[in-house]
Amino acid sequence: MEGKEQDVSLGANKFPERQPIGTAAQSQDDGKDYQEPPPAPLFEPSELTSWSFYRAGIAEFVATFLFLYITVLTVMGVSRADSKCKTVGIQGIAWAFGGMIFALVYCTAGISGGHINPAVTFGLFLGRKLSLTRALFYMVMQCLGAICGAGVVKGFEGKNIYSINGGGANKVNDGYTKGDGLGAEIVGTFILVYTVFSATDAKRSARDSHVPILAPLPIGFAVFLVHLATIPITGTGINPARSLGAAIIFNKHDGWHEHWVFWVGPFIGAALAAAYHVLVIRAIPFKSK
């Protein structure tokens, strides 16, 4: 007890993480009795004095940095090759995105909730899983991490090669309209955020104790499948921080011309997923085993 009191006094875990991934979504009594987690307050200024708040932000920064580093480097490797047969191809790019989300969500779930995506953070905020204070802080740290990650890739590739091969920036590809791109981003982000809500739902945690442990797997797999489907359309954004980081470092017309699509689409998709979860999924009566 003395050790726990000391941790609290130092601000280590003074404010419990409200992210639904990991222990926050689990119920009491060995996970068999369902207890709805209380909704997060809209504003929680007291979080600003907690070390756990800043630790979570650092975790989001590092995770998004690593995410952009691996994924954009993979995209650049495919783009610069004279033959796609010599590269991992679209399937490899999709695996890089999905695999990194799986690994990073697993690593950071217990610290920040493993969002790594402003659209996911926005959806969970609408679902009252975290406060506005934390949501805004996460989004800023995610965007900063993405910029740094893309910047490191540019340093490795060199300015000329990086620019010639598109810098991993998202755009609506030839043959598709802005409406096509917006629709692809909305549906793709809906699938991702819907999966996040479903994989971390407290009701499922109460019924099946293994659900929180396996949560990163379906989330990463959803990212993989969405990339397979929408890389030909937009290069697949579904993550405004990923799109912003690549666009800032690339800094060409192609990266900015339709950039709004990669913010509006994911935020609409996240909002729809949050609404569906609150109005439909959470309305289903709970039945324990």
Image: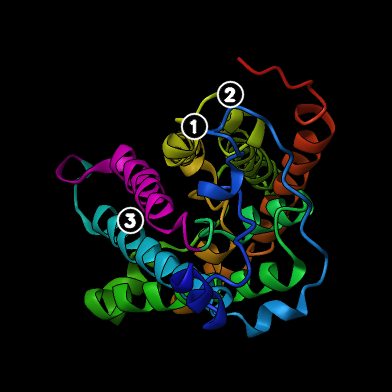
Nearer to us in this view, 216 or 74: 216
Q: CA distance from mark 3 to mark 2?
A: 40 Å
How far across and down, in percent of the image, does residue 133 sit?
73, 73
Question: Is any atom of residue 252 visible in this view?
Answer: no
Please, is residue 167 above or below residue 19 in the view?
below
Seen at 47% across and 73% down, the residue is 2
Seen at 48% across and 50% down, the residue is 235
Please, is residue 100 above or below residue 208 in the view?
below
Q: Amino acid at mark 3?
A: Val
Q: Which mark is residue 273?
A: none
Q: Amino acid at mark 1?
A: Val
Q: Which mark is residue 75?
A: 3
Please, is residue 256 above or below residue 6 in the view?
above
Mark 3 vs 2, N-terminal side: 3
User: Mark 3: which secondary structure?
Assistant: helix
The residue carrying pointer 3 sits among few (fewer than 14), some (14 to 19) or many (20 or more) residues within 10 Å by Cα, namely: many
Secondary structure mainly formed by the magenta segment = helix
User: Of the residues tagged 2 and 1, which is closer to the observer?
Assistant: 2
Q: Which stretch is magenta? A: 85-111
In this rendering, the count of numbered labels is 3
User: Mark 1: which secondary structure?
Assistant: helix
Q: Which residue is disc 2 drawn over?
A: 207
> Could you tell me which quadrant the C terminus lies in?
top right
